[in-house]
Image (cartoon, grey):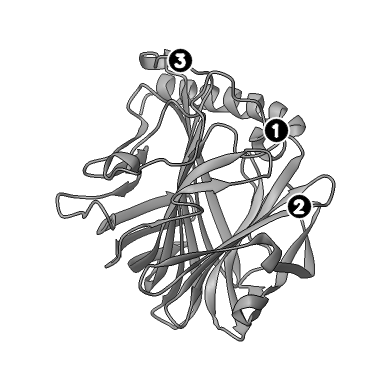
Amino acid sequence: MSADKLSRRAFAGGIAALALARRAHAQGYAGLGEAADGFAKVTPGKVFAFPADHGPHPAFRIEWWYLTANLVDSNGAACGLQWTLFRQAAKPGPQGEGWANQQIWMAHAAVTRADTHRFNELFSRGGIGQAGVEAKPLAAWIDDWEMKGSERTDDRSLSPVTLKASGTDFNYALTLEADRPVVLQGDGGYSRKSERGQASYYYSQPFYRARGTLSVDDKPVDVSGEAWMDREWSSQPLDTDQTGWDWLSLHLSSGDKLMLYRLRQKDGKDYPFGNWIGADGRTQMIAGGDIQMTPKATVDVAGRKLPVEWQIAIPSRSFSIACKPLNPRAWMGTGFSYWEGPISFTGTHAGVGYLELTGY
């Protein structure tokens, strides 16, 4: 890669991060509560179309392809990994050519074990071929990081796909397969984020089985386990008084899946939501009033006090679990910093999952 290309990419990414950080301070986590005049709006009743909706939606301001995996290595040790590609439009309107393109791409990758947490971050400007997403066959990439399908990839299940990313002291390569279709979150894929109309389009593939290799400090091991991919796009998913979220994706030992989050508000009236996903892929929304998310223990990381242990209860389902992190110090010290790491849980149900904490 030429020095000119690298410096331009770093400059574009740095300017984007600084601009977004300014907005983030006043508009909730990562500026996601900023008014989105001129961008497409999220409304109920969308009919999802695959493979098209696996690809980008540039008329909307923000979008991500987000994968987490709970794995076990060949020595029986638990570990986790994250792969995320974010797209943000700097302004609405027709897409510019080359460096004039208004799409900014950012990617995060991480590996977490009980004894270490490693992460890396990349930036690119759209329009120059260095990052992007194609729907069929799926190709989501930035530099040499990629989530990639093939002619064999089924549009409904988005399977099989391969995944790879690296940092100076880690790398991984996985194959992901699922035998059930993707799952629409919320009301048919319309996911409300507040009582005042904020929402996103949101679907997941929570049934991936993962296998491959993971290396930390040039020591590769074989890994296998379960993975969860979230696809979400919007133009203003948060209201201005929402400061961040606490989000969980849970793989139950029964084969069921559970997605839960609470959006924190400045007035203390948090907005919770859940979706129970049966092992057969059928879903049932869980009303916010039936969700109890109680922080039980905190850890001091990067000058912040973070609630990394939780008690979760859903009385209507006789569901009560205690969640603990694999590594309490799984801090993502990226441009927009947050906590993200694998967890395990016990109680009325057992299993593994991922916890994300933003806006602290």
Q: Which mark is residue 121?
A: none
Residue bearing the label numbered 2:
302
Q: Quadrant of residue 58?
A: top left
Report x, y in % for residue 86: 48, 39
Residue bearing the label numbered 1:
24
Mark-to-mark CA distance, 3 and 1:
22 Å
Which of discs 3 and 1 lies nearer the camera? The answer is 3
Q: Which one is in front, 55 or 48? A: 48
Report x, y in % for residue 15: 60, 22
Dot 1: element: helix
Q: Which one is in front, 223 or 126? A: 126
Q: Which one is in front, 215 or 89? A: 89
Mark 1 surroundings within 10 Å by alpha-carbon count, few (fewer than 14), some (14 through 19), many (20 or more): many
- Callouts 2 and 1 close, C-beta under 8 Å: no
Q: Quadrant of residue 294?
A: bottom right
Which quadrant holds the N terminus?
top left
- Residue depicted at 45% across the width and 83% down the height: 254
Q: Is residue 279 left or right of residue 187?
A: left
Query: As shown in the figure, which amino acid type bears the numbered disc 3?
Result: Gly
Of marks 3 and 2, which one's residue comes earlier in the chain? Answer: 3
- Callouts 3 and 1 close, C-beta under 8 Å: no
Mark 2 surroundings within 10 Å by alpha-carbon count, few (fewer than 14), some (14 through 19), many (20 or more): few
- Residue depicted at 24% across the width and 59% down the height: 160
Residue bearing the label numbered 3:
93
Report x, y in % for residue 285: 54, 62
